[in-house]
Every structure is written in structure tokens, then in C-alpha cells.
Amino acid sequence: MKITVELQGYLDQYAPGEDATFSYEVAAGATVGDVLERLEISEELAAAVIVGGEATDRERTLAEGDRLTLMPPLAGG
């Protein structure tokens, strides 16, 4: 099934192409954690996980057409 993945901030370096927002093929029943593993993004780097506009966790099962947004930890001072 296809989902859309959006990698914000420096997470864009983990995109499989040049675009930080891309279509991604995952198996039925895949979770957010499965996508993180396939993209080789550690859980610490994906501080915020959003699916369909709602904050969620890595155990969330994805559905056809979902939009998964991953954000790095905020930094600054």
C-alpha cells in the first residue's frame, strides 16, 4: 500500500530521493516503527510523529493513503 512520508528539518537526509516529501510503498499492517526502521531513522531522531494531522506513536498501524510526518527534536536556546 502507498503512504506519503514527509521528513522535516535535517531528517530530509533520510529521504530515498531528493524530495523530503515522497510516496512510499509499505506492506499492509506496517507501523510507523516499520517505516522508521526501513528509512534507518532512529527513534531519538523522530521526536514527533504525526499521522493524518494527529500526534501518534511508533506503534500506530498505517493505512492506505496515510500521510506520515516525522519531525526532529527542537533545538535552540
Image: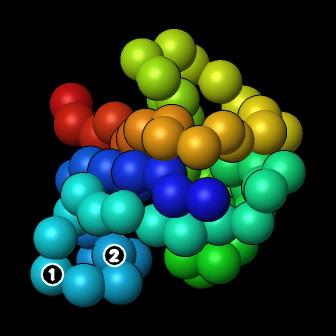
Q: Is mark 1 on a helix, strand or loop?
A: loop
Task: Say which residue appears at 65% left-offset and 78% top-offset.
Answer: 38
> Above or below — where is 16 with respect to 43?
below
Residue furthest top in the image: 54
Task: Give the number of the disc on residue 28.
Answer: none
**Picture mark count:** 2
Residue furthest left in the image: 18
Tell me the residue that label 1 is attached to.
18
Picture quadrant of residue 57: top right
Q: Is mark 2 on a helix, strand or loop?
A: loop
Q: In which quarter of the image is the N terminus?
A: bottom right
Task: Say which residue appears at 51% left-offset and 58% top-offset.
Answer: 2
Picture quadrant of residue 19: bottom left
Q: Can residue 48 be seen in this view?
A: no
Task: Give the number of the disc on residue 15.
Answer: 2
For the residues labelled 1 and 2, say whether their Cβ atoms are less than 8 Å apart: yes
Q: Which of 46 and 52 is in front in this view?
A: 52
